[in-house]
Image: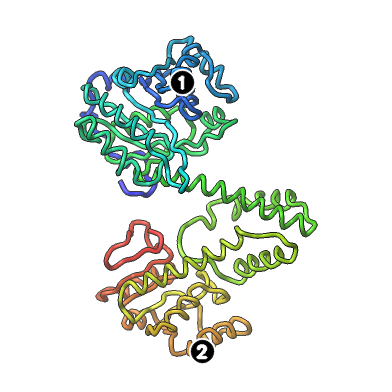
Amino acid sequence: MDALVQSPSRSAWDSSVLDKKEKARLDSASKYRICVFGIGYVGTVSAACLARDGHDVVAVDVNQDKVSVLNRGLSPIIEPKLAESISSGVNAGRLKATTDSSAAVSSTDISLVCVGTPSQENGSLETSFLTRVAQEIGESIRKTTNFHSVVMRSTMLPGTMENIVIPILERSSGKRAGQDFGVAYLPEFLREGTAIADYDDPGTIVIGVDDDPLTLRRLMQIHERFAVTPLVLSIRAAEAVKYANNAWHATKISFANEMGLLCKAMGVDSHEVMNVLVADKKLNISPAYLKPGFAFGGSCLPKDVSALRYAGRNVDVDTPLLDAVLQANENQIRSAFRLVAATGKRRIGLVGLSFKPDTDDLRYSPMLEIAERLIGRGYELAIYDSNVRLSQLTGVNRDHLTSRLPHIACLLREKMSDVAAFADVLVVGNRKEFLKNSLVLNGHDKVIIDLVRISPEKQTADDYRGICW
């Protein structure tokens, strides 16, 4: 399964992999025996909620004090509504705790790993808790004939499952992942203080699984009571989703705080401003502008970010986030240039010149910036943009173009076929222009540098390079 979000039906389901006991379970109440490793915030909440939902749960931890507290029906952590769920689960006999990982794994169908991955001094993850638990689970799986699913919830960087967790599980068990036991990644999105509410009403559910239909089926059934349909990704993509979420949340907080400092210094109520910002669900709180691709440009975004930075300096307010926004935009332009340079070819065609489709606005266009840098480095250039005609440009727009590219008349082509005949490399900055004229590429051997994601199926290869995919 690739890294794109897939519908659950994409993963093939072969009922022949199930034994009779598993089939009976799936056909009945869809309840499982689950052991949860780690009696911390995520583990305790997960164990309590799973037991409350009718599953038989064993919580595992090396800390005997936590185990004893849980077995008395008490919560080892402070979290609203958690104590009630633990008490009812223990009293009903569906929740217990132990330090014996081997007994827990051998008596359950699924291991849910929720141990910590704290940050080290250099910013890297501490994975020793993960490796220890993976070793213990693998040794326990070696002794069982049942198909056991190992599901990781701990936050880990993309590739950790593939490069660390799965190899340890396979070495210690003597078995093959996906064949003799299952593996999956189930990132958690629980906030301390509202963890129970977040568990019961999730914004999204993500399941990362690679070629393991039984583990996927188990996780789908565990989550079938929720209104949200789980999104099924590859394990690596699911690992990345957790970090994308947290980085986005951190960015939002820092942005709100930076705007708050600026507004206060300029005599504006920042909460009033941000209330209006979040009221816009079309552009501000929406998928708009959140698709990876090329740099931003145009007459508004670069100018206004620069103006805010200038205003901050005038009122002695630092704007590190806004500074970084422009730095990140410049980095995207440099990344595109490096993709072109890496081809080793010198005849380059640009598809699109304006800063976005369906406009002739060239102000702060990143495609214009790319054109200028290529010419400055001695590349031969041809440009096609059906909306950019030198004879039709006027005022500031024309002046901006001719000042940046004095010889623009020699570079513009009337037809896409002219660019295709000239260039060895096509840099696509306008998806609509490319798709509308893609047939003219038939018979031409080109390297495509894609800055806009022409097609979601395409991935970087010899004759195709995507800037972010």
Residue 434 shown left or right of residue 315 in the figure: left
Q: Residue at x 48, y 23 (%)?
A: 49
Q: Residue at x 47, y 69 (%)?
A: 333
Give the percent coordinates (x, y) of residue 154: 42, 36
Q: Residue at x 42, y 84 (%)?
A: 414
Residue 340 shown left or right of residue 371 in the figure: left
- Which of the 4 image quadrants contains residue 421? bottom left
Question: Which circle marks residue 34 in the picture?
Answer: none
Position of residue 234 relative to residue 73, above or below, is: below
Q: Secondary structure at mark 2?
A: loop
Q: Residue at x 39, y 68 (%)?
A: 435
Is there any visible trace of residue 27 in the rendered image?
A: no
Q: Secondary structure at mark 1?
A: loop
Position of residue 296 relative to residue 290, above or below, is: below
Q: Which residue is mark 1?
A: 53
Task: Please name whichever residue, 322 or 288, is drawn nearer the observer in this view of the structure.
Answer: 322
Position of residue 55 relative to residue 149, above or below, is: above
Q: Which residue is mark 2?
A: 406
